[in-house]
Amino acid sequence: MDAGELWKRYRRYFCRVDSLDLSLDVSRMHFDEAFLNSMEPFMLKAFKDMDALESGGIANPDEKRMVGHYWLRAPQLAPTKEIGQEITATAESIQKFVSDVHEARIKPPNVPRFTQALAIGIGGSALGPMFVSDALGNPSTDRIRMHFIDNTDPDGIARTLESLKGHLHETLVMVTSKSGGTPDTRNGLVLVSQAYSAASLSFSRRAVAVTMPGSQMDELAAGEAWLARFPMFDWVGGRTSELSAVGLLPAALQGIDISGMLAGAAECDAATRIHDTRRNPAALMALMWYAATDGKGKKDLVVLPYKDRLLLFSRYLQQLVMESLGKQLDLSGKRVEQGIAVYGNKGSTDQHAFVQQLRDGVNNFFVTFVRVLESGGSSAEVEPGVTAGDYLSGFLVGTREALYGNDRQSMTITVPRVDARRIGGLIALFERAVGFYGSLVHINAYHQPGVEAGKKAAAAVLALQAKAHAALSNSPQTASQIAEAIGDAPPEETVYLILEHLASNGRARMTRSADPGDTTFTRA
Amino acid sequence: MDAGELWKRYRRYFCRVDSLDLSLDVSRMHFDEAFLNSMEPFMLKAFKDMDALESGGIANPDEKRMVGHYWLRAPQLAPTKEIGQEITATAESIQKFVSDVHEARIKPPNVPRFTQALAIGIGGSALGPMFVSDALGNPSTDRIRMHFIDNTDPDGIARTLESLKGHLHETLVMVTSKSGGTPDTRNGLVLVSQAYSAASLSFSRRAVAVTMPGSQMDELAAGEAWLARFPMFDWVGGRTSELSAVGLLPAALQGIDISGMLAGAAECDAATRIHDTRRNPAALMALMWYAATDGKGKKDLVVLPYKDRLLLFSRYLQQLVMESLGKQLDLSGKRVEQGIAVYGNKGSTDQHAFVQQLRDGVNNFFVTFVRVLESGGSSAEVEPGVTAGDYLSGFLVGTREALYGNDRQSMTITVPRVDARRIGGLIALFERAVGFYGSLVHINAYHQPGVEAGKKAAAAVLALQAKAHAALSNSPQTASQIAEAIGDAPPEETVYLILEHLASNGRARMTRSADPGDTTFTRA
């Protein structure tokens, strides 16, 4: 296509959300009118599915749950008055709690105020909060400094605690777990509260829980009289919980404008609720995913925001997209193995790294550029007439062109700046695109059976670990011998891996052989 | 395959580097003896190619350069005495400079010592240093606190400077650019040195250059009498420069054991130099990449280290693998569009995110687990007999098993702990696997023509920007009209994107229309 035709195509498919000043350009994707027309009946079905979801239908049939993240920013649209009130009351209680913390009406014993906050959570309880904290934070104006524990790695937990050294007494701890039983989060809670005890500090006077009312963690927090408890709702999934208490509480503590985030999401929702594919950027984006991947995940989605503040956006989207769409069965139970792989980092940094492959190498992806119009920072010239921001902009435009020249597809989302409203809008845009795409490929985008299965697999390993540990004796045994001692024919390889782990952590002794089958273990 | 056979397969292909206590398990990859045998002639060719490279052959034919990163940790193997001496002298000068900084023999004016260091660099001059800093740093024992500027985003640069507020006078700035002309790095240098001027602080008395002798930046640093200059060598590429001054200087300043890193890399090099495929983990890994991707990048490499400290490993490998292997032409000039896409984050965090898709969804990947045996941190029990580290270990083993159960491939690298020697070893392992794979698929793994082309494309956009800016007048013009005024028929779409950028940054006025073709621009 020559430059003139490209410009016509750009204008023809240009899609803009005026209220947010956010636009989507899909002109450099491979699709034509025939494709859009052929998909229209399916898109209409997707619109209907979304309407049903938003009116309180059981959109997550496997878990028999409603899917209500859109209500969080439009409580008036909730299917019952009670739900609407719960949403409003929670948002108000967060604002009140945070203003009490900022004004030191709620404060730790013996010091003027909380200066640090530590968020413990994993998956949806960490990725959104970390993304928003980094996107909208400013070290010199943040009200509170944020820290995160998002894993069950004791070394990682120790390092985070080390960075809080001397500040533990003025650190507010938020523990976020929907079910209240996620072991990774529970483990973080145990080790952090032990650190408080070790420092002779009351943990409960600095702790806040975000969890489902009545959960194990909710009961613990109530029993120990933590500072506050905020509800998670049954009808909000982890990966779409950024605009629930999960994301709003830490953001507000940091000093981020959470009303702006909610407003931006609501504006994007309003613009993507319309049944007009070409004017609906979420619909258009879902269709582009379909066109690029053949509706089967045949290409990867590479996220390239040209803005340091959006570095964690790809990691956030990795969960949102892959956990939602990566499903074995479709809604009729047919084995489909769906999904779209997502990765990315930021431009122009990546042009000095993996963009080499995007330009020249295996053509197994399509790019989503995020273009931020206002450069921010210093507008000093780095050479006559040119700023650092001009370079950033020039690299984006040049790379988009170069990819096209090599037959690589891309689309571009443009926003004026990275602020609370646009972050809310971007989250809402992708949430709805994921929902539409789920309908197009006929899957449940709202459950995560593999995550549950993963937890069970780990529990089985831990159960076997207890048996393997018990089967150790003073005489050297191989993994096979210990497997035999355990009985019930556990897999020898798993027993070996467990014993190697125990031996490396002082709970067994190991004498290595070149052949792992000959390596022996004794009691520590 | 049943558990008994799996265990046999594990033992049969188990590959261990005794000196480093590092092992590779490829048993859960899809390959058989026939594959290994059929690949042996190609692997022998790869060994020969590597030998030629290590003896100083022109292994990067397009740029007519030697490829010498292996000499950095074994100067005695360098092809000439002079090169060996350069390496040794540079390492010694780094150690001396760093000890002078640590002991405050080199210090900023009027304060006792440097407490912070700011590294400015992009691509290979940032990804390795950031990875190592995070992997081996400890907030309470680091000798100097590290900060990074790795982009030409003025907002990002401003934010980094904001985080250095009150410390600029005691901050050492390292500027790293091989050619000395990378615009992103130059832009960072310009804005940072302006910040020093604005604070009435001498920049040159706090600045250090890492660049090729004689480069533009080297001359600048010499002319302004910066604190020190360290050489980059023509025969070391950016993505393999972590064990050159590029990576060693910042790591040493932070207090990281760079001798340990060099020793670990040297040990891994020794173990992967042998011409015995089954005992050489780099060779085995390259073959697995070939088996999994059909030698054509058909599957993505997902890196899953179960350890917080290795979070940035995947981003580092993304560059190392994709920039090396993502090539359009093979060595005979045939269009091949090679490469392997790399992404990842960390376990068990990712199990609550995209591992859902890995388990259940589109089967377009193979996993490389990194297993760290010693848990570190607190060994307190989180439930009877179980530690947080047991969970981390259990999640890895369980996920590996679950992936296998769903016909997903994985391999596992095991190290005892994350320390300087193992980080050096891991870097060396992947560097050599990339080199072997490059030979197997017959490409130049040591150049990056797309990166150069990207720089040119951006330069063209900036040149057009100057013209578009000059063509603005007091009467409103559309992008097309301005394109016409510029002459030589520049692409109207590019002109539009440039004008939108200028208007968003105070250098034009814009009146938007629903159709971007009707949007008009005037002089600001």
Image (cartoon, coloured by chain):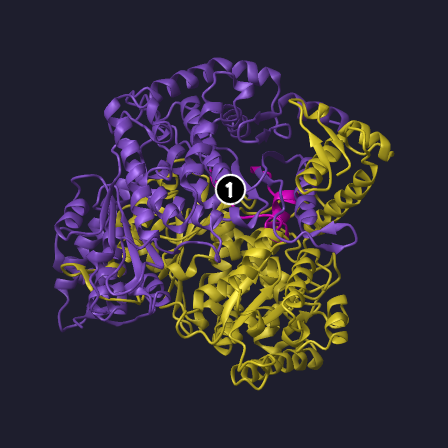
Chain colours: A yellow, B purple
Quarter of the figure with the N terminus of chain B? top right
Local crowd at mark 1 within 10 Å, few (<14), some, or many (≥20)?
many
Q: Position of residue B278 (x, y in %)?
A: 56, 19
The one of B367 and A158 positioned closer to us in this rendering: A158
Q: Is residue A42 visible?
A: no
Question: Of A288 and B245, which appears nearest the observer?
Answer: B245
Q: Chain of mark 1?
A: B
Q: Judge by depth and name the residue closer to the eye, A478 or A366.
A: A478
Element on which disc 1 rests: loop
Q: Relative to B309, is B440 on the left or the right?
A: left
Residue B328 percent across, percent down from the top left = 35, 32
**Image point 58% across, 30% down: which residue?**
B23
Q: Residue B11: horizontal and vertical position, in percent?
A: 67, 24
Question: Does residue A141 sit above or below A67 in this rendering?
Answer: below
Residue at coordinates 79% horizontally, 53% vertically from top-left?
Answer: B384
Q: Residue A457: in sight, yes or no?
A: yes
Residue B111 position within the rendered picture, expressed as x and y whole percent measured from the top left? 29, 64
| Magenta stretch holds residue B353 | yes
| Amino acid type indicated by mark 1 | Asp
Q: Is residue B20 above or below residue B246?
A: above
| Figure quadrant of the C terminus of chain B | bottom left
Circle 1 is placed at which residue position?
A: B419
Magenta residues?
B341-367
Residue B109 sits in which quadrant? bottom left
